[in-house]
Amino acid sequence: MIFVGIDVGSRTLKVVLWDDARQRLVASAVADQGVDQDALASQLVDRLLLENGLAREAICSIVATGYGRKLIGMADRAITEITCQRWGVRQRVPEARTIVDIGGQDSKLIRLAADGRVVDFAMNDRCAAGTGRFLEVVAARLGTRIDALGRLAAESRQPARISSMCVVFAETEIVGLLASGISPADIVAGVQASIAMRVAGMGGRSVEGPVVFTGGVALVPGMTGALESALNQPIAVAPEPQITAALGAAMLAASDKE
Amino acid sequence: MKDKAAQLTLDEWDIRYRELCRHGLREPDYGGSLRRHVDEGGDRRLLRLRMDNSEAALRLWNLLLSEEDRLHRARAEGKYLVGTMKDLGTVPVMAYALDDTVAFYPDGAWWTPCLMEHTEGLLALADQLGVDDSFCPVRAMLAAFVNGNHFPIPDTVVCSVGATCDDMSAIAQRLDELGFPVFWWEIPHRRVADADEPSVELPGGSRVPVAQVDFVRGELNRVRRHLETGTGQSLDDARLAAGIRRANQVRRLLGQLRRFAYLGDPSPMPALEMMIAEILSIHFCSDWAETVAVVEDLLAEVRRRLIANEGSRPAGAARVYWINPPADLRLMNLLEEAGGRLCGTDYMIAHALDPIPEDMPPLEALARMALADPMVGSSAERADRIAREAARFDAEAVIVSRISGASHCATEGLAIGRIVERRLGIPVLDLEVPPVLDAMEPTIRTRLEALVETVRSGRRA
């Protein structure tokens, strides 16, 4: 009784196989996005099935989520990532009351009731300034890799102030900061703080803990600390934070609850 | 010819229209196929909308999309044209009390970039005129005045200023400077009366000091004299009272339409048509008599559908109370495609849906109505009314549709959202939508679908 969750994100596509009878995550995979998302999802599912000695017939149901959720032909249902995050995070961190999800293209703040229901959510509006895209732009501008940004930020003594509300303008601002001798470490720390502040702004003044951090950006060292400073409370990174929405989708595939 | 309720694409409406004609469709002089508004008027957005299939909706759309023709005809016939700005629903009542006088809202041009999908270049021209996208899309009006390609230049422009939207004030000042003289009248910020100050109740329930009503009445008396000078007619109390009764006829019809449409399940009239109908309350689409006829038709159709238990979408959709008009009409379709439906609205014209008092001198009544405008009071007062209405219509969620660049929306939406959330405990979704939302459609869809999922999850709990 295998259920599949597919999270079609803007930067990566995630697949999870879930054994509902044993309440166990069987396998998961993350791949960079391609042009044909349906084919990519299909390949990933087949690979995971093969690696785990399963046949396609073992799959009972598939739920797709993420911005490309409606492009997956093999999916039985499409459910938004907000609902899927709730299920995936509650499986991993049952006491969670707030989810901060920062992906490549958008960021979300999801408030949960004590029983785990979604109470409310907010998403970034117009610009990528609160998303992983900002980190990509900075990494490219500094000639480094995104996974090296955390190490760089750790060397910061005085995080730079990034005032722009827009990634394009922020890039210009970064050029100016570099020209005025600000270190790359301080710039990266400033960018991380800027992203964290924007996400915190979505929550207004009332972000109830425990707060769980998900999405690909949760894997970037330094971001958790930046968020903790911005939200003024401890943040727990979800185990395998990239796959929580896919996990929730797989759990929903096994359920008629949503 | 009555078909079951459905929402049609423009192609489907072409077929429907031919069928209706074959069955003897009777239309007013502005009638015709909806396709002509794309082919002749350039209203390309219709190609992306799904419109209600009723004859009543056809008449509504045709009334809306033929307004510019009507205004040009009025100009050719020598009628006096009053461009009304910012006050929502007051000056038109006065203007329509006069013979051969037509009032319209040039700021209605804010929907033109949406309807024509930016092919008309109004926002680009507004940029060149120094009013860029840090302002509300209502800036399209400024460009429409300058290029003269849309509405005829009115004989007078009457604009309220004071406790009004900053964008509108800035744009109207620019118009003034460009040689389109504006007659200004002032509306103060609505405040609570001091303890020892006499106060009166306004339509909608707020109370204000008598002194504020007196002041606004004086301002409206200036407007009255201005219109008398312009038209050469006397705008006496008897005429004003008749104008108020006409306006109230539309408001009462819309009140019934809203009650039936928002309480019925399945929803008997789609969100898009309801929005257009509600906004008729302030401007009558430049034809009061046709507005009455159009709303009566809609009401009859809604009643028929309620009896037949018909809606274009299934029963049980998530009941959403909507705040502020969206710059892109397509958003209302998206709500329904996501599994939601309207169950109440505050398009910033809530006061214009309340009947104007008829048991007092007409200028006093108009002054009270003008002061009831949500935009001249505090966000908290607006939120209070919204929360009361949302509860009355059993709303399960609220959407605050912010308008890109609109100064009042930038801050007011958040404040209203928080108050409504605290009072009603239902989810509030904050959306900001540009005049053409296509590039943002996937993310907007996600939010709307997530809101509907949240409502459904709450029902199960």
Image: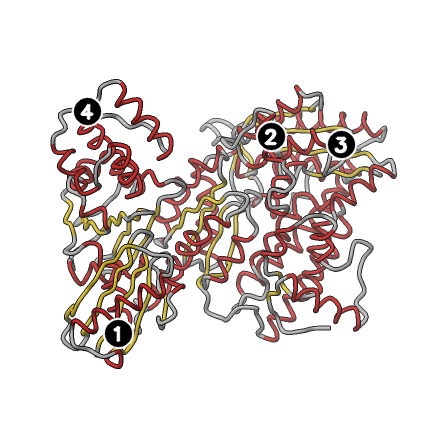
Same chain shared by disc 2 and disc 4 = no
- Residue type for callout 2: Ala
Compared to residue B231, the image places residue A132 above or below, namely: below
Mark 4: give few (<14), some (14-19) or many (20+) Cα within 10 Å.
some
Residue annotated with mark 3: B154
Q: Nearer the viewer, mark 3 or mark 2?
A: 2
Residue B76 found in image quarter:
top right
Relative height, residue A225 to residue B13 (above, below): above
Q: Secondary structure at mark 3?
A: loop
Q: Position of residue B362 (x, y in %)?
A: 71, 37
Crowdedness near tag 1: few (<14), some (14–19) or many (≥20) residues, C-alpha within 10 Å: many
Discs 1, 4: same chain: yes
Query: In the rendered view, would you say B132 is above or below B390?
Result: above
- Residue at mark 2: B126
Q: Of marks 3 and 2, which one's residue comes earlier in the chain?
A: 2
- The residue pinned by badge 1 equals A254
Give the amino acid at mark 1.
Ala
Give the residue furthest to the right.
Answer: B77
Distance in Å between CA atoms under marks 1 and 3:
64 Å
Name the amino acid, label 3.
Answer: Pro
